[in-house]
Image (spheres, grey):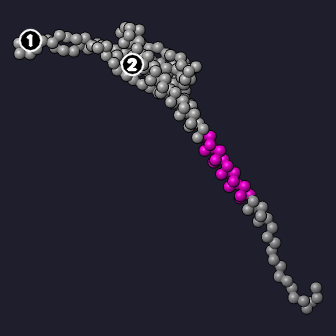
Amino acid sequence: MSPMSPMKPMRPRAEGFGVVAALLVLVVLSVLGGAIARMSWTQQVSSAQDIDAARAQRAANSGAEWGLYQALRGGWTTCNNTSQTLDLRTELGVWVTVSCNSALYVEGENGSNDELPVYTNKNVRVFVIDAVACNGTATCPDNSRVTSVGYVERRRQVQATDQ
Protein backbone atom coordinates (compact mmCIF):
# COMPACT_ATOMS: atom_id res chain seq x y z
CA MET A 1 0.00 0.00 0.00
CA SER A 2 1.25 3.32 -0.80
CA PRO A 3 1.25 6.02 1.80
CA MET A 4 -1.20 8.05 -0.23
CA SER A 5 -3.84 5.36 -0.78
CA PRO A 6 -6.83 5.49 1.47
CA MET A 7 -7.02 2.76 4.13
CA LYS A 8 -9.92 0.46 4.28
CA PRO A 9 -11.47 0.24 7.71
CA MET A 10 -11.04 -3.15 9.37
CA ARG A 11 -14.35 -4.87 10.10
CA PRO A 12 -14.59 -7.44 12.84
CA ARG A 13 -15.14 -10.85 11.41
CA ALA A 14 -18.62 -12.30 12.09
CA GLU A 15 -17.73 -15.96 12.23
CA GLY A 16 -19.65 -18.53 14.29
CA PHE A 17 -23.08 -16.89 14.09
CA GLY A 18 -24.37 -19.63 11.78
CA VAL A 19 -23.26 -22.34 14.25
CA VAL A 20 -25.19 -20.71 17.11
CA ALA A 21 -28.32 -20.38 14.95
CA ALA A 22 -28.05 -24.02 13.83
CA LEU A 23 -27.70 -25.21 17.44
CA LEU A 24 -30.74 -23.18 18.46
CA VAL A 25 -32.81 -24.69 15.64
CA LEU A 26 -31.67 -28.22 16.61
CA VAL A 27 -32.61 -27.68 20.25
CA VAL A 28 -36.07 -26.36 19.34
CA LEU A 29 -36.69 -29.26 16.95
CA SER A 30 -35.53 -31.79 19.57
CA VAL A 31 -37.91 -30.38 22.18
CA LEU A 32 -40.76 -30.39 19.67
CA GLY A 33 -40.03 -34.01 18.66
CA GLY A 34 -39.93 -35.09 22.32
CA ALA A 35 -43.26 -33.41 23.01
CA ILE A 36 -44.88 -35.12 20.02
CA ALA A 37 -43.51 -38.52 21.07
CA ARG A 38 -44.76 -38.05 24.65
CA MET A 39 -48.21 -36.99 23.45
CA SER A 40 -48.42 -40.02 21.15
CA TRP A 41 -47.42 -42.38 23.98
CA THR A 42 -50.00 -40.82 26.33
CA GLN A 43 -52.72 -41.19 23.73
CA GLN A 44 -51.90 -44.86 23.17
CA VAL A 45 -51.93 -45.60 26.91
CA SER A 46 -55.27 -43.77 27.28
CA SER A 47 -56.81 -45.74 24.43
CA ALA A 48 -55.65 -49.04 25.92
CA GLN A 49 -57.08 -48.09 29.32
CA ASP A 50 -60.39 -47.12 27.73
CA ILE A 51 -60.65 -50.55 26.12
CA ASP A 52 -59.71 -52.29 29.38
CA ALA A 53 -62.25 -50.17 31.28
CA ALA A 54 -65.02 -51.11 28.84
CA ARG A 55 -64.14 -54.79 29.23
CA ALA A 56 -64.10 -54.48 33.02
CA GLN A 57 -67.52 -52.75 32.97
CA ARG A 58 -68.99 -55.56 30.86
CA ALA A 59 -67.45 -58.14 33.19
CA ALA A 60 -68.88 -56.39 36.26
CA ASN A 61 -72.32 -56.36 34.62
CA SER A 62 -71.99 -60.08 33.84
CA GLY A 63 -70.85 -60.82 37.39
CA ALA A 64 -73.85 -58.98 38.84
CA GLU A 65 -76.24 -60.93 36.61
CA TRP A 66 -74.53 -64.21 37.50
CA GLY A 67 -74.79 -63.34 41.21
CA LEU A 68 -78.50 -62.53 40.87
CA TYR A 69 -79.05 -65.85 39.15
CA GLN A 70 -77.22 -67.70 41.94
CA ALA A 71 -79.14 -65.84 44.66
CA LEU A 72 -82.61 -66.07 43.13
CA ARG A 73 -82.40 -69.57 41.66
CA GLY A 74 -81.01 -71.34 44.71
CA GLY A 75 -77.28 -71.46 44.10
CA TRP A 76 -76.81 -69.30 47.18
CA THR A 77 -79.65 -70.04 49.59
CA THR A 78 -79.07 -67.26 52.12
CA CYS A 79 -75.99 -65.69 50.57
CA ASN A 80 -74.84 -63.94 53.74
CA ASN A 81 -71.21 -62.94 53.21
CA THR A 82 -70.95 -65.31 50.26
CA SER A 83 -68.26 -64.50 47.73
CA GLN A 84 -66.87 -66.12 44.61
CA THR A 85 -64.24 -65.03 42.10
CA LEU A 86 -64.88 -65.67 38.42
CA ASP A 87 -61.92 -66.02 36.06
CA LEU A 88 -62.79 -64.23 32.81
CA ARG A 89 -59.20 -63.67 31.70
CA THR A 90 -59.52 -65.71 28.52
CA GLU A 91 -62.66 -63.85 27.37
CA LEU A 92 -62.14 -60.32 28.73
CA GLY A 93 -58.79 -60.27 30.49
CA VAL A 94 -60.28 -59.60 33.93
CA TRP A 95 -61.23 -61.24 37.21
CA VAL A 96 -64.67 -60.65 38.74
CA THR A 97 -65.27 -61.01 42.47
CA VAL A 98 -68.99 -61.41 43.16
CA SER A 99 -70.25 -61.11 46.72
CA CYS A 100 -73.75 -61.46 48.06
CA ASN A 101 -75.46 -60.32 51.25
CA SER A 102 -79.09 -60.66 52.13
CA ALA A 103 -81.48 -59.53 54.82
CA LEU A 104 -84.93 -60.80 55.74
CA TYR A 105 -87.66 -58.18 56.21
CA VAL A 106 -91.24 -58.56 57.34
CA GLU A 107 -93.82 -56.63 55.35
CA GLY A 108 -97.43 -56.01 56.36
CA GLU A 109 -99.17 -55.70 59.70
CA ASN A 110 -101.83 -57.47 61.67
CA GLY A 111 -104.93 -55.33 62.02
CA SER A 112 -106.56 -55.51 65.43
CA ASN A 113 -109.87 -53.69 64.88
CA ASP A 114 -112.72 -54.22 62.46
CA GLU A 115 -112.24 -50.93 60.58
CA LEU A 116 -108.88 -51.90 59.09
CA PRO A 117 -108.42 -54.85 56.78
CA VAL A 118 -106.36 -57.66 58.18
CA TYR A 119 -102.97 -58.11 56.50
CA THR A 120 -100.83 -61.12 56.87
CA ASN A 121 -97.14 -60.74 57.46
CA LYS A 122 -94.99 -61.47 54.48
CA ASN A 123 -91.33 -62.36 54.68
CA VAL A 124 -89.24 -60.72 51.97
CA ARG A 125 -85.56 -61.42 51.45
CA VAL A 126 -83.53 -58.59 49.88
CA PHE A 127 -80.34 -59.60 48.11
CA VAL A 128 -77.46 -57.17 47.54
CA ILE A 129 -75.06 -58.37 44.85
CA ASP A 130 -71.72 -56.58 44.52
CA ALA A 131 -69.55 -57.41 41.47
CA VAL A 132 -66.04 -55.95 41.18
CA ALA A 133 -64.11 -56.55 37.96
CA CYS A 134 -60.41 -55.73 37.56
CA ASN A 135 -57.36 -56.73 35.59
CA GLY A 136 -55.51 -57.61 38.80
CA THR A 137 -53.62 -60.73 39.74
CA ALA A 138 -56.26 -62.99 41.33
CA THR A 139 -59.04 -61.16 43.20
CA CYS A 140 -60.72 -57.81 42.95
CA PRO A 141 -60.14 -55.19 44.14
CA ASP A 142 -56.38 -55.72 43.83
CA ASN A 143 -54.93 -53.26 46.37
CA SER A 144 -51.35 -54.07 45.36
CA ARG A 145 -51.90 -52.77 41.81
CA VAL A 146 -54.23 -49.83 42.42
CA THR A 147 -51.55 -47.20 41.81
CA SER A 148 -49.92 -48.92 38.83
CA VAL A 149 -50.34 -47.73 35.27
CA GLY A 150 -52.82 -49.84 33.36
CA TYR A 151 -54.83 -51.10 36.35
CA VAL A 152 -58.57 -50.89 35.70
CA GLU A 153 -61.40 -51.64 38.13
CA ARG A 154 -65.16 -51.35 37.75
CA ARG A 155 -67.93 -52.09 40.28
CA ARG A 156 -71.61 -52.91 39.82
CA GLN A 157 -74.03 -53.30 42.72
CA VAL A 158 -77.62 -54.48 42.36
CA GLN A 159 -80.47 -55.25 44.74
CA ALA A 160 -83.33 -57.67 44.25
CA THR A 161 -86.00 -59.43 46.28
CA ASP A 162 -87.20 -62.99 46.21
CA GLN A 163 -90.80 -61.85 45.72
Q: Residue at x 80, y 74 (%)?
A: 12
Q: SS at mark 2? A: strand
Quarter occupied by residue 75: top left
Indicate the amino acid at tag 1.
Answer: Ser
Q: Residue at x 40, y 14 (%)?
A: 69
Left or right of 87, for residue 129: left
State whether the magenta stretch is mostly helix, strand or loop. Answer: helix
Which residue lies most toward the left here? 114
Quarter occupied by residue 135: top right
Which residue lies most toward the right here? 2
Q: Position of residue 41 (x, y in %)?
A: 62, 40
Mark 2 crowdedness (10 Å alpha carbons): few <14, some 14-19, many ≥20: many
Q: Position of residue 111 (x, y in %)?
A: 11, 13
What is the span of residues highlighted in magenta in the rendered image?
A: 23-42
Q: SS at mark 1? A: loop
Q: Position of residue 139 (x, y in %)?
A: 51, 19
Front position in the image: 151 or 60: 60
Instruction: Tell me if residue 5 comes above or below residue 55 in the rendering.
Output: below
Q: Position of residue 16 (x, y in %)?
A: 79, 65
Left or right of 1, for residue 154: left
Instruction: Tell me if residue 19 comes above or below residue 102 in the rendering.
Output: below
Indicate the amino acid at tag 2.
Answer: Ile
Front position in the image: 159 or 139: 159
Q: Residue at x 42, y 20 (%)?
A: 64
What residue is shown with label 2? 129
Mark 1 crowdedness (10 Å alpha carbons): few <14, some 14-19, many ≥20: few
Which residue lies most toward the bottom here? 4
Answer yes or no: is residue 32 visible: yes
What residue is shown with label 1? 112
Residue 31 is one of the magenta-drawn residues:
yes
